[in-house]
Image (cartoon, rainbow, N blue to C red):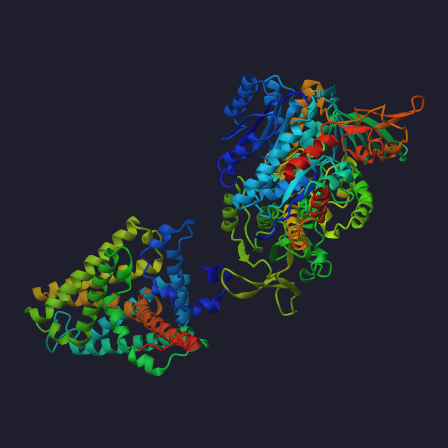
Amino acid sequence: MRSLQMGLEAKLESDLEPWLCYYCGECSVECPRDAEPGETMMSLRRWLTARYDFTGISRLFYLSWKAELLAVIIVALIAGAGFLLYGFSQGNITQYNGPDAFLPASSIHIFDWTLAAVLLALLLTNCARMWWFTVGRDTKVHVPLSAYVRKIYLLPTHFFTQMRYARCEQKRPWAIHLVLMLSYVTMLILIMFFLAPMWSGPAVKWSVHVFGLAATAGLLVTTIIFLRKRLKKSEVQYQHSHETDWMFLVLLIVVAATGLVQFTLHRLGLGTAANINYVIHMMAVVPMLLLEVPFSKWSHMAYRPLAMYFADLKAEEMVSKAREAVGAPQAA
Amino acid sequence: MEDLKIGVFICNCGTNIAKVVDCDAIVDSVERLPYVTVARTYKYMCSDPGQDMIQADIEEHGLDRVVVAACSPRMHEPTFRKTLQKAGLNPYFLEMANIREQCSWVHDDPVAATEKAAALTAAAVLRVAHHEALERRSVDMCPNTLIMGGGIAGMSAALDLADAGNRVYLAERSDHLGGNVARADLTAPYLDSARDMLTERVTRVVEHPNIDVLLESQVRKVDGFVGNFQTTIRGKADDGAPTDSVYDVGSIIVCTGYKEFDASRITHYGYGKLPNVVTSFELEKMLRAGRVTTKEGRVPQYVAIIHCVGSRNLEFHAYCSRVCCMTALKYAHEVKSAVPGAYVSDIYIDMHAFGKGMEDFYRRSSEIKTLFLMYEKNDYPVIRKADATDDCDMLIEVNETLSGETIEMPADLVVLMVGMEAREDSEEVAHLVNISRDKDGWFIESHPKLDPVATTTDGVYIAGACQAPKDIPDSVAQARAAAARILARTARGKIEIDAVFAEVDEEKCSGCRMCNELCPYVAIEFDPEKRRSHVISALCKACGACVAACPSGAITARHFTDKQIFSEIEGVLA
Amino acid sequence: MTFEPKIVGFLCNWCSYTGADLAGTSRIHYAPNVRIIRVMCSARIDPTFVLKALHDGADGVLICGCHPGDCHYSEGNYKMMRRYPLLKSLLADYGIEDERVRLEWVSASEGQRFADIVNDMTERVRALGPSPVKAALEADLAER
């Protein structure tokens, strides 16, 4: 808070602490000066996201919601147009599966992976910048490579369990967020690796679809819960909602909803409807993956686990240095 | 000596005395002394039941002398003298032994403390046997008051006294009323106009039929005593020549105020060298003119305010000047409203927001986006000229404690919150009215807690910043308190003067006249016919200089006779 | 048994006595060896008081007044100042050590200073031992 007041940008940029916060809101409730530290941390995360991003797009989105909306709409329209053109060029709109399929699974698969590659390239670059700001250029702490390797398990651990959030006084928010996150990840895995089995025929393959349905249910329920909380401003952390918060939830709900509709239409054998719905689905998915993940709120899914990992590495290094300084034995 | 009946009353003062001194042991030791009829202890002798107990014992046992071993006589001598009076005994038949301030509060060894307390009580017992009945004199109380200083304190006191129908002589050294408040624009914490406040006061004072406003006037001499002072005031005649006038007054209130610390004494702030480093009063001048600009006439983008300039500093003044923190916040508000885009930083050690509305004011100052930077007491900020490439005039290097960072704060204008100090003429004033000053030059009050406006010189009161740094509400409170004290006395019309003075035994006097020259009050006159000296009791202050000097031992100091003091010496060493 | 000196203090009402009271209200502790007698002004202190105190068994005498220039009675302390050297030379003739009788200026706000003076004087007199006056008087009495 102090660095913010004094405008110490370089210090803030190198700080991991905003990412250690999950915005349970306890601090804002306790603050005797009503300074809203919780919302300040949230704003800091948005600022840091903008700083890590080398393209400047993130900054633009945070400063102008109209720019973000426009970008999403443009990307959505281009995606929509692209898919329609592709579909019409080589398939029949009434056909969902088979040789004449409007949008064959194989093509989608290639598209998905290309999109993933682009997204990963952008995201990973930004993550590298994050590492540089927070760990790399810190002259006071030097983390050895062995430590990075030894502690790499922290990344998936934090990612999948959100365990630090569970340490807040209120456990419910952690639970809901965990469900949302796991549902999202499940869906992602299904789409990236199990697209073909999901696509094949109207017959229900329960072994595949049970996960998809569970994930979709999880997504829909939690997203609606969050939307409601934000609309009702029910708790302290929902008092302020930035446009990026709404965009995040709206896109997610559209993706999940159209996903469910997709499943239903597909099972019902309504090919045309299914295809059209799928185009709409992709019109939400593409901006989400291309814009929201690397440049907007979604990026926190990468930055936060990374921050936990880096923080642990730095802490371990500082403790070991301190022990050395006082001549105490090093930890086993 | 006739058979006396002495009552000895030893106070426990709760645990203040009883915790260290064994009061029962003292009872035992005094009971063995000659003429002691009654000796007892009580929890709080000065309380109503305590006093009633003394009165009852006086009546029951026919006591004719009373010793109270308790707190300092400077605390309760008047209280117990009244008790004796109520019981029909002359109030001067009392002697107190100071076994609290000068015994139980300063010693921790109970054996030594009890021994000492017993000795002090014994001394009082032996002394009181030699006390004589003395009658207090009653003299007319002149209802006029001299007020030295025409600032907010002086004017407030003047109005209360004048409204009650008494004449007030308000002597002001400069050519206008208002003092230091007249130099201010607005006041913290409500941002009221100082001018409006003063105009109301000044108008009423100037128009009041009972107040004589003496501008460009200085008090040259004060003679006399409480209720009967004669003061000589040098003013300006119509043609500009100095002219002396004498006034009769019964009381004097000293409201001479303060002066500000000279900031050029602190070199690392560059005052006097860097043109845009100004003091608080210089900023007030700008604010009153309605324009805040740098020396070069530009609107400042960055304004910094530094607290504790000359205060809380062992090198200059160790004390806190009390008003500057809130005044600094006032400047933050005023600068922000004069220059809306300005970046205001407030560089302080601690934020002293002690009074009514002040914490809220502090909060409001945060809300207008003042940046607060804290520095440690002896780790002062340093101001230097910025380079040509910087977008500001000066840079202030601060070791900021809240963030732990050393930063350079830009500033186009720096405001130094200079502290208060005693005026150069405070020594002169103190001697004029016979009051004392403490080590920082502020006038000393009679008692730091219970008597903040009276002084050791009866009839002379102090009010406002001349007593210690304080803000307007406190200055006005003290001024009006002093006025109330005076009104309580003038309402009686007469004043009782202590019966203690010196007397010449004409039979013993050899007419050597040594005493005549010694008296600082010229209270001893020589009768050439009788060839004897004689003390004018109304003028005598009982200092005893003449008593000690008389080679014939002809002068006695009532209530401080040689016999009385000798018995005290005996008692103390028994 | 350490020798505990008995010191009589003559303090003027306005400055030094008030200063001693201030030491009390500030709870500043000091040695219990000084027994205070109040006078209105140091000018009242007749040299015979000092002699009587020494005669009656005091090991030391402390005289306190206002700082020069600050006397409540204008110049009383100057009068004390003038008498003092004569008194001291008289005492010296009697063989009474210089440090047994002391003149100090203590103002009403100097509680700590008063305590320091008492402590310092107590130690100095302790070092000198019991007053020679006592011994001389006893010898005198024994002779008779």
Name the residue rendered at 35%, 50% in the picture: A29
Q: Is residue A215 above or below residue B133?
A: below
Determine the residue located farthest toward the right in the rendered image.
B529
Residue C13 visible in the displayed image:
no
x, y percent for residue B341: 57, 54
Q: Position of residue B132 (x, y in %)?
A: 70, 23
Outermost residue to the left: A203
Number of marks in the image? Answer: 0
Establish if A30 lies above or below C20: below
Residue A266, picture quadrant:
bottom left
Judge by depth and name the residue closer to the eye, B538 or B291: B538
Q: Residue at x 50, y 60 (%)?
A: B402
User: Does residue B520 appear anywhere in the picture?
Assistant: yes
What is the x, y in percent for residue A268?
8, 64
Relative horizontal placement of residue B33, taking residue A321 as reference (left or right): right
On the rendered image, what quadrant is the N terminus of chain B found in?
A: top right
Q: Please state which of residues A197 and A25 is positioned toward the viewer in this rendering.
A: A25
Q: Nearer the viewer, residue B498 or A53?
A: B498
State the residue lying farthest toward the front. C144
Task: Tell me where residue B246 appears, x and y as whole percent.
Answer: 84, 28
Quadrant showing the C terminus of chain B: top right
Residue A145 sits in quarter: bottom left
Comparing B488 with B289, the one in front is B488
Query: In the image, what residue occupies the spot 67% across and 36% down?
Result: B570
Reply above or below: B213 against A219.
above
